[in-house]
Image: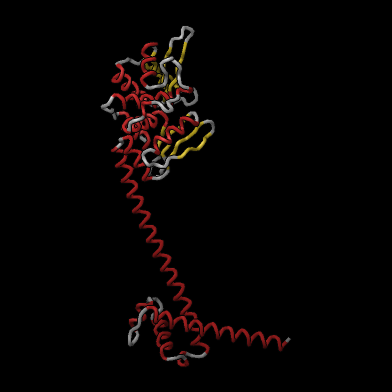
Amino acid sequence: MSFSKEVKDELSRQLSPARHCMIAEIAAVISLCGRVLINDKDCITLKIHTENITVARKYFTLIKKTFNINTEISIRRNSYLKMSKMYTLSIVGHDDAVRILKATKLIDESMEIGENLSAISNLVIQNVCCKRAFIRGAFLAAGSISDPEKTYHFEIVAPNEDKAIQIRDIINSFSVDAKIVRRKKYYVVYVKEGSQIVDLLNIMEAHVALMNLENVRILKEMRNSINRQVNCEAANINKTVMAASKQLEDIRYLKNTVGLGELAEGLEEIAELRLEYPESSLKELGALLNPPIGKSGVNHRLRKLSILADNLREQKEEVNYGNKENID
């Protein structure tokens, strides 16, 4: 089972004890995957279409508990995806459908249905608890969440921009930075920050999924921290090896050209030690001196040796260049 299905399965069993919160959740489901059909006698039928059995089960339970209305369920195979099924839940009784639409504020007292079943600015999502329920219903109806082992991504797909803005604003009222992006003919409300997705799971009251995601986040952060330390140590080791290699090259050049005995006493001593202990750190070299000196002192002497070696190389190049000109 995918992480997204695990979250939805947990939310499908989450029932608010308050009737107004149930109505807010029903409003979200109808708004995102509902249809209102009106026949030639002006009788209304309310239908919900979903490919997710957990959404169908939750919607059936909410309607039964909130309005004591039985919902007709039909199942058919998706014509495009042969393995998937489409669940249709229908409220065929005109009075029952109107009762639900009025309670969810998707239809007004004059029987005018909100455009595209819009729930914008309605009264069912004024309370904080109802906003939580609405987000939960919206996620169940049209949401998904990626596997946190791979990436952090939470989204709810809305059929139009107004609904996307509404969902985004409700989510952002909980101090979560949700954004909207257009994807073909749909508008997607999304969150990509791991800590904010944790907050959203808490808002929807998916506490088991929240703990699972937090465990994954902790492990990932530990792995990333260890990888950063290993990379840092590897870079430092590589830097140290490269520096030691250059130091040995310079010291050997000085030894072969002018001889180490011609160097100042402190430089000769550190040069001999570096040749004897090519893999030792600056701190270890400093401890071998008499009297011992610190890393900065050792580094200062080795830099002087490098400068002397570079100067000798430049002088040799100038002599060779002058000889070449005389020959020419």
Q: Position of residue 11 (x, y in %)?
A: 32, 31
Is residue 74 toward the left or the right of residue 162 in the image?
left
Give 194 or 27, whichever is nearer the viewer: 27
- Quarter occupied by residue 129: top left
Is residue 165 toward the left or the right of residue 15 in the image?
right
Instruction: Write the residue at 67% across / 87% down.
Output: 322
Up the image or down, 212 lies above or below 94; here it is: below
- Quarter occupied by residue 3: top left
Q: Position of residue 80 (x, y in %)?
A: 50, 25
Is residue 324 toward the left or the right of residue 71 in the image?
right
Up the image or down, 67 lies above or below 268; here it is: above
Colour theme: secondary structure
Up the image or down, 193 lies above or below 232; here it is: above
**Residue 84 in sight:** no
Q: Position of residue 243 (x, y in %)?
A: 46, 74
**Residue 74 in sight:** yes
Q: Position of residue 252 (x, y in %)?
A: 48, 83
Instruction: Write the residue at 30% across / 20% down.
Output: 66
Instruction: Write the residue at 37% across / 32% down.
Output: 135
Give 111 or 242, whichever is nearer the viewer: 111
